Image (cartoon, grey):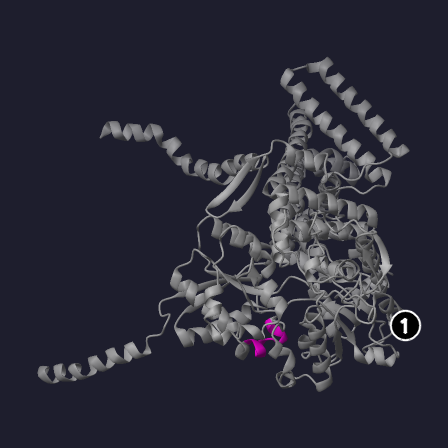
Amino acid sequence: MNTLNEWIEKQSRKLFITPAVFLILVFSVFPLIASLIISFTRIRPRAGGYTMRFVGLKNFKKIFFGSEQYHLLGTFEAVSAFGWILMSVVLFLLIWWLHIYIKREFRLIGFVGRLISALFILGITILFSTTLFSDKNFGTLPMTIIYVIFGCSIQFLIGLGLAYICSMNLKGKTFFRILFFMPLMITPVGIAYQWRMLADMNRGPLSGIWQALGLGDLAWGSLAWPARTIIMIADAWMWIPFIFIVLVASLDTVSKDLVEAAEVDGASKLLVFQDVIWPQIAPVAGTVILIRWIEGFKLVDIPLVMTSGGPGISTETLTMHSWTQWRALDFGGSSAVAYTLLFVTVVICVSFFNFVIRKYSQANQI
Amino acid sequence: MLKYLIKIMGVFIPIIFVAGMVSAKKYDGVTIRVLSRPGPVISGAIDKRGKEFTQMTGAKVIVEELPYAELFPKILADWTQGTNSLDAAVTSSAWVPELVDMGLVADLSDFVANDPGLKIDDITPYFREFNQKVNGKTYTLTLDGDFHMFYYRTDVLNRFSQEPPKTWDEWFKVAEAIHGKDYNGDGEPDYASCAFKRRAAQSYFTIWSVASSFIQTKGTSQGVFFNVDTGKPLINNPGFAEGLRVYKEMGKYGPPDELNMDISDVRAMYLKGRCAMLIEWGDTSPLALDSDVVRNLWGASQMPGSKRVWNRDTNRLENCNPTLCPHAINGVNHAPFGAFGGWSGYINKNADPKVIKAAYELFSYMNAPEQSNVDVTQGWTGFNPYRFSQFNNVDQWLEAGFTKSSASSYLNGLKESLNNPNFVSDLRIPGAAQYTSVILDTEVARFLAGEINAEQTMKNIEEKWEEVTEDFGKKKQMNLYRATLGLSAAF
């Protein structure tokens, strides 16, 4: 009996985490491996099961170099002068960055990681230079990056601004804290339908305002950039509350003494924010940006409901692209797009974590 | 006391037993699980008739609903993996050949042959021979006769002294004359045309309703998607190019946000009286009965045609002549398009035999004239006419609320379309979703948005269709395509 109790005591750590590990394996790891295998195959359902044919990299070749290249990446023709300049500047900066690393603190793993990030950034720069900045159509990959980097940056700035205001000693701040948080509780599909109505320029509930602003005749759903803007507004409306609530909590932990001391010393509000408040909330801010980016890469419900990815494919995201392939029962193609999304998300988020968040945290500790 | 009780029980128990036997129904204990789209359209009608069927036969009918985009993947997953949680489905008939090819659908030929109540000859030839059959055997029962018709506001055209257009050229003349005028008296300019062009909605049907009249001239069996002799996609040609041109030009006479409008948006517009011309399924006129603004104001005809068509031998657009357009009416080639095929009922081959029989009888009950002739007059059901008795008997339409002239116009439009030997059958081969609702839909959406020109659109569609065909196997695909057009295998 004692032996049994001792054994249980020894194994208890493993026993307690086994259910969680099992769930992660079943719902995350195995599906990840299964979809990787599927991305190298053509699967057809048939009576009694399915047929699976190994096709190697064919699904990936199709989306990067074949008939679906325009859909994933965009249309490539002549590069504009601005595109050439941008590519050259970025290439120079990346080489300089790697050079500095090699000179100062070279470690093989660190160098390989930086090389991957650098090549990725260069690839994205080339992609944007040859499509968006050369006035050519771009595909779901650049569109998703725009939604994430640009869209989430705007969301962060607005969320930070609202959080800063609500952290001050103002009347009614509790009411506004609750009000600003509410959109996060609404289902994304509900928000998408709501914004489809709100953005209806001549029949929606806000049509009076749109018409007063001279936008009554704007058919945003038929124009690429207005459609993208409305989608980003809807996405921002949904996610700013998340950024707001996290930063409000972080701002509440900022030492009031330090702030008062700085004010007494004559520092302006901007200087107080820059040198006293921001360093204290930066780690949380970095984390909230990272979480938002990870979530942003999965954007599908809002563009699907508001525009179905149109006009054309101008508002389609990578997740929608993958879903469209799945809908057509092209499971291999769908998995190939999904894995491309996974690769992009991992490289961007890990790079951000390593070169921004961790670096900043280490610098602050010193 | 005990003896008395035993005597009472001795009398009543046999009575109860006999009564139970008498009231035992044919399919007591049988449950039929039917999958369809979210209601009330279609599913609501199945549910209503299902309850009546339960009363009559004892079989329990459970309607399971899924969003449209998930229906086919669900059926495939459920029936191929052996889960068999679904006994039957009511979905697009265009999906059935692929399921039949996989051996998943019950053959209903014997049931139909022994079912005089079905009145099979009352079903119009297209739905009876093309829609319900694969390789000469019946696998589905039509519940809804889907094809596109052309609708026009009789009051608007009369007001501006216009005749309903018979060709696309005439269509543009009428549109020019009436676009931007106020049709419903609200002071706002209204639109000559309303069309659902939103991506991933139903635009990939409407393009065929426009383009078919330039491409198919020699009857249903000529086909409009692939060359039945070579298997080459019938996309990169002057006929489809002309269809694309017309489809895009129509947008000048429609709402500015037409590219983001799906069928619900368009229906909301025409029920409010904001549209004068429409390409839609047969729901328009019955739905309009619920509108105070446009009730009985919609006329109908078969789709406008063209006097110039694609000659496949010379690869040019040429004027119709008796050889090139044997089915032309007054020199105009019409090609009404059987968009979507229609919601049809079919049964899981691996369901319990008793359930198969019960499910067949459910669909037969719904299809029978006594029920279907009422259902097709009611817009909310989503069921459109497909039987001769539904076109020929005006009284049931008058009972539903039509006036004599609007019923007459609607039924003539239906008859004109279905009696046209050049009726176009929708694509009903494996991968139909890939060919049309993904590839064609995406490229046409890009064309309408101005991302690519017509030439690039056709080239992209042709290239990707050929990839899909190669993937499935060209010989098998093309033989199946020929089978759906009533042709024997040739590849």
| Pick the front one: B336 or B405 | B336
Residue occupying the far front of the picture: B323
Decide whether the magenta segment is chiefly helix, strand or loop.
helix
Q: Quadrant of residue B142?
A: bottom right
Magenta-tinted stretch: B372-381
**Residue A235, x across and y down, in percent:** 70, 50
The relative height of residue B471 versus residue B79 in the rendered view (above or below) is: above
The relative height of residue A290 versus residue B177 in the rendered view (above or below) is: above
**Residue A234, x across and y down, in percent:** 71, 53
The residue at which mark 1 appears reads as B177
Based on the picture, tell me whether residue B110 belongs to the magenta stretch. no
Residue located at (20% from left, 83% from top)? B12
**Residue A136, x across and y down, in percent:** 83, 41
**Residue B444, x across and y down, in percent:** 76, 52
Kind of residue indicated by mark 1: Ala
Where, quadrant-wise, is the C terminus of chain A in this rendering?
Answer: top right
* Apparent side of residue B66 relative to residue A305 in the rendered image (left or right): left
